[in-house]
Image: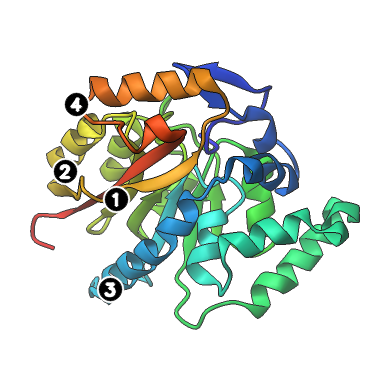
Amino acid sequence: MAGPGSGGTEGVTGGKARFEDIYGRPDPRAYFGRLAPLEYEIPHHAQPVFRRTAADRAALHDAGARKTAVLDLCCSYGINAALLNHDVTLAEMYERYASPAARTMSTEELTASDKAFYAARRRPDAVPVYGLDVSAPAVRYALEVGLLDAAFTDDLEQGPPSPGLRRALADVGLVTLTGGGSYITARTFTALLDGARRPLWVSAFMLRTVSYEPIARALAVHGLSTTVDVSRVYPQRLFTDERERRYAIAAVRALGGDPTGYEENGRFYALHYESRPDTA
């Protein structure tokens, strides 16, 4: 569930490359180093969207409840949490982790530096963010530097939430997703909704190569209506090679989309899906 996978070595599933080795490191330097040449940018596009949606959800009054938390699926090293709650950009994060200073630090030194860096940039409207990812090293880093308020490694594709995650779901009012949409299914969302204690919203960026319909149906069973503006697309990253390009073009066409001007030009694109209770 770690973005595009966790542990192991790089592979290809269904024609889409996986970068499994970069999610099992003790800090995010390999993550940013591998994805920078591919211009991975979807968290940048999600930043203003998630801020607006989190503010809208927090404005609702959940009687007797604690402050509404965000649960970021496939959170890896807490990238979305950093962008949501701190005055920082994705470009600045790429620059930071590629800097000569960062390259020479130990993981312990980088952790201490990052803790101070993000604390100094914490926004006054910050909201609690919980992270869910099967990569223990990634979520441990995000927790240690203060990007996440709680972190879990449950694989909800394989089983129900652990007792700890079930307790945390009592606080969650918004679920976010930018990476990993190609690797998790409606099973994960059903498990979360089954354990929810308050009205749950979902804000997800899904590649155009993947159908969101099974997830939307699962959300509808729990009373959530899903909307998407198919005219607005968001660049995700460059293809690693021609194989990925051919795969993406064929997948988009199979779903009734048109890759002209988008995937045909050499990169993945995503759509943004927003799901809220019918009464919201």
Residue placed under numbered mark 4 in the picture: 256
Distance from the alpha carbon under mark 1 to that under mark 3: 15 Å
Does dot 3 land on a helix, a strand or a loop? loop
1 and 2 marks in contact (CB < 8 Å): yes
Is residue 60 toward the left or the right of residue 76 in the image?
Answer: left
**Residue 180, percent from left and from top:** 46, 36
Of discs 4 and 2, which sits in the foreground? Answer: 4
**Sooner in the amino-acid sequence: mark 3 or mark 2:** 3
Residue placed under numbered mark 1 in the picture: 196
Q: Name the residue furthest left.
A: 279
Relative to the observer, which residue lies in front, 115 or 16? 16
- The number of callouts visible is 4
Residue 100, numbered label: none
Residue 222, numbered label: 2
* Residue 149 appears anywhere in the view: no
Is residue 174 toward the left or the right of residue 159 in the image?
Answer: left
Residue 64, numbered label: 3
**Residue 269, percent from left and from top:** 38, 40
**Residue 79, percent from left and from top:** 56, 55
Name the amino acid type tagged 1.
Ala
Name the amino acid type tagged 4.
Gly
